[in-house]
Amino acid sequence: MEWMLLPYRRYAEFSGRSRRREYWLFVLFYWLVMIAIEAIFGTPQSVTMGNAFSYGVVANGAGSAIGNLFALASLVPSLAVAVRRLHDIDRSGWWLLLAFVPFLGWFTLFVFTCLDGTAGSNRYGFDPKARGVADVFR
């Protein structure tokens, strides 16, 4: 649970590096909270258009407001942890702008967030896994 909430404690900290564990557990926590909000406050809806059928849950009223407030409160931490995750693989945070490129940009960012960070220090800070010269003696 500590890893899930760490980006909220480092709210607007765009410098430094973040491990894959911190990033992906934060993403998991965000989606679990959003799913819980929809499960508690949502109403089931189905849509039929021609031969297509769609079913889902939509949060209305208080659930919508709570979900929007949570998403707004999570905006800055999610950007910050994504930038720190890019820093961990020695990439600039500006690579996050690839999110505006459909499919290819999304896939590239997904791959970047799945890559292991650079071992040892890089231009963005120390290795959060504390790997380096001392690993030789283990």
Image: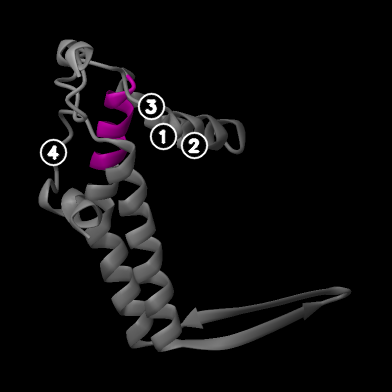
Marked residue nearer the N-terminal end (1 or 4): 4
Q: Kindly report the distance in space between the C-alpha atoms of the residues bearing marks 2 and 3.
A: 12 Å
- 10 Å crowding of disc 2: few (<14), some (14-19), many (20+): few
Question: What residue did someone put label 2 on?
Answer: 110
Q: Residue at x 28, y 25 (%)?
A: 88
Q: Secondary structure at mark 1?
A: helix
Q: Does the magenta-highlighted stretch encompass residue 7?
A: no
Dot 4 alpha-carbon crowd within 10 angstroms: few under 14, some 14 to 19, many 20 or more: some
How far apart marks 2 and 4 lie (CA) works out to: 21 Å
Q: Is 125 placed above or below 79 here? A: above
Whole-percent x and y of residue 57? 55, 81
Disc 3: which residue: 116
Query: Label 1 sits on what residue type?
Result: Thr
Do the numbered discs 2 and 4 sit on residues whose CB atoms are within 8 Å? no
Q: Is residue 93 something one can see in this rendering? A: no
Front-most of residues 48 and 16:
16
Q: Is residue 43 left or right of residue 83?
A: right
Residue range corresponding to the magenta coloring? 80-89
Residue labelled with disc 1 = 113
Contact, CB < 8 Å: mark 2 with mark 1? yes
Q: Amino acid at mark 2?
A: Phe
Whether 83 is drawn above or below 45: the answer is: above
Which residue bears the numbered disc 4? Answer: 13
The vertical placement of 13 against 136, above or below, is below
